[in-house]
Image (cartoon, rainbow, N blue to C red):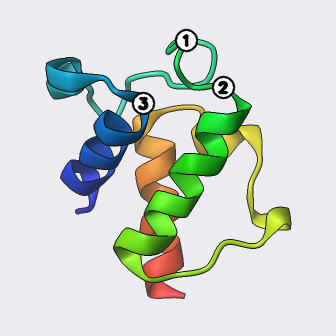
Amino acid sequence: MYLQEVKTILADVLGLGAGADALTEQSALLGAIPELDSMAVVQLIAAMEEQFGFSVDDDEIDAATFASVGSLTAFVARKLTA
C-alpha cells in the first residue's frame, strides 16, 4: 500500500536514481545497498516522519525494520494504523 512512497524516499535519501525502480518488497536493504549506512538510516527515518506525519521513537527501530523494502513498508503501515 505504501510501497511506492517508500521506494521514492529510498531513492531520494540514498541517491539511487533510476535504480530504485528495480526495488521490490523482497529487495534486501541493510548489507545489500552500500549507501545505506547508519547516517542514511537516520536520514530515512527523518524523511519518513516528514512524508507520513508520524514520529519514530528510538526503541521502535531495529535491524529487522531495515532488512528489506517490504519490512520497511510494513513498518510504515504499522505506524500509520497505530
Q: Nearer the viewer, residue 77 or 59?
A: 59
At x 27%, y 61%, the residue is 2
Q: Position of residue 16 (x, y in %)?
A: 30, 23
Mark 3 and mark 2 lie on one chain; the one further toward the N terminus is 3
At x 33%, y 48%, the residue is 9
Circle 2: residue type: Asp
At x 26%, y 51%, the residue is 3
Q: Secondary structure at mark 1?
A: loop
Q: Residues within 10 Å of mark 3 (few under 14, many from 20)?
A: some
Q: Which residue is mark 1?
A: 34
Q: Which residue is mark 2?
A: 37
The mark total stands at 3
Q: Secondary structure at mark 2?
A: loop
Q: Residues within 10 Å of mark 2 (few under 14, many from 20)?
A: few
At x 57%, y 25%, the residue is 36
Q: Which residue is mark 3?
A: 14
Q: Is residue 32 left or right of residue 4?
A: right
